[in-house]
Amino acid sequence: MIEGDPDDVLDVYFRQCSILVTCRDLAVMGATLANRGVNPITGARALAEEHVPSVLSVMATCGMYDFAGQWLHDIGLPAKSGVAGGILAVLPGQFGVGTLSPPLDDVGNSVRGIRVCRALSEELGLHLLDPPRPGAAARGTAPAPAASRRRRSVAAQEALEGASQRILRQRPQGDLTFAAAAAIARSLDESCPDGGSVVLDLSSVSRVDGAGAAILCALGDTLAARGVHLLVCGAADHPRLGAEIERRADAGDAAEIDVRGDAEEALEWCEDRLLGQLGVADEDALPLEAGELCRRMSPEEVADLRAALEEVAFAAGEVMIAEGSPSDHLLVIVTGRASVITTRDDGSRVRVLTIGPGMFTGEVGLIDGGPRSATVVADTPVTAHRLTRAGLERLSDDPALQTRTLLLLNVAESLSGHLRRATALLAAGA
């Protein structure tokens, strides 16, 4: 059947069917086809892009000899088998797979290679004809520095802003399958510095499959090795992720993942951790004169303001200000922490802000007299100063003692800060 010089014919044949190919070579070949003909390692083009679909089509229809139809049905990847025991498979646009094991089956395909590729396809959801739902593949912005809605002392806030790159948040959307999870894991691992914290917010992810769950658990291990803490929010909505975490725990290999209820809670935890690393304390108590309401006030003006204040206390969980109630006072927190909560159109409640010692709330209603636009609830036991409308009217405003003017100026600056933060949160999609 061979015409001409056998040496010349065999030379051509061996150039086409390399006897020196390795498993890595096969994987690179597959990755090159997945990358539209460009070698992803060297960046060199190995095959013209217009020929790639033709090569993949031939591989899909007859690359596995007489097993090609069953292979496409079961495994769903264009592939090419060699009688030396090699298989290269391709998931277009994503990656290539190479296996090498000489024992062959009756039609000339590697027995173990088929088993490996079948397991990969099933476990990672790689079947070409069972892709993620149209438009549902996970997407989202790159990891970015993020801050919670909790307001902190000046020193703590400055420290957090100076080290903002050590807390990152990523919020993907859509289906978190193998390729999407791998890309997210890689970007988080590359972006977060050693010792930092990462918040992965799954609240907009529609589905996490088994491969995505396994990759997220492995990501926790990878980050933990660098001292990076991974917090995952919204995991309760994804049973495959919960099952993978439980499976690993039962096997004695607990995933290094901190599951949290929501991103706001997770970000607050990250900030507390970072402040601890920086050795900066967030005040547990702050006297009136050191708080926001008394900026630029002289001791005499602070004394004038103190005379107009009333001392009040609230238990943890107690409503300090109720949404819709009359506006007749503001509160200045001395000790403890409280949350400002508002109601959405759909009836759900969302925390807008968390405030602590030295900060105040209720100022908008005190100024405009309208009904309260939000509810304030004590997160911990709270002691506070209360300034009523009558007390505000009693404050001095003469040239020597401008208590009321300075107080209103400080309130205006605080409102401006609230507006800027709200704008930043809207821009970030939070």
Image (cartoon, rainbow, N blue to C red):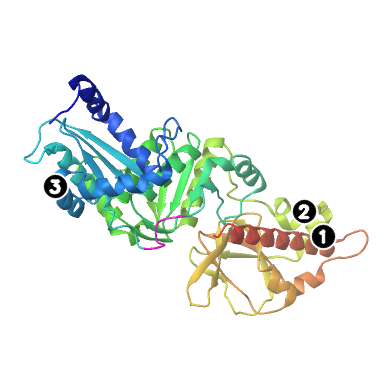
Give the magenta-colored segment's residue range.
134-139
Q: Is residue 8 above or below residue 223?
A: above
Residue 406: which numbered mark, if any? Answer: 1
Asked which secondary structure carries label 3, the reply is helix
User: Pointers 1 and 3 in contact (CB under 8 A)?
Assistant: no
Asked which secondary structure carries label 2, the reply is loop
Badge 3 is on which residue? 67
- Tag 1: amino acid: Leu
Q: Quadrant of residue 301?
A: bottom right
- Tag 3: amino acid: Phe
Within 10 angstroms of label 3, few (less than 14), some, or many (20 or more) residues? some
Q: Quadrant of residue 228?
A: top left
Instruction: Single out the mark in the foreground, 2 or 3.
Output: 3
Q: Tell me if 76 is positioned left or right of 206 in this view.
A: left
Q: Is 279 within the magenta?
A: no
Q: Earlier in the sequence, mark 1 or mark 3?
A: 3
Q: Residue at x 27, y 26 (%)?
A: 15
Magenta stretch: helix, strand or loop mostly: loop
Q: Quadrant of residue 391?
A: bottom right
Q: Is residue 184 above or below residue 263?
A: above
In the picture, which quadrant includes the C terminus? Answer: bottom right
Residue 85 vs residue 392, the one in the foreground: 85
Q: Earlier in the sequence, mark 2 or mark 3?
A: 3
Badge 2 is on which residue? 295
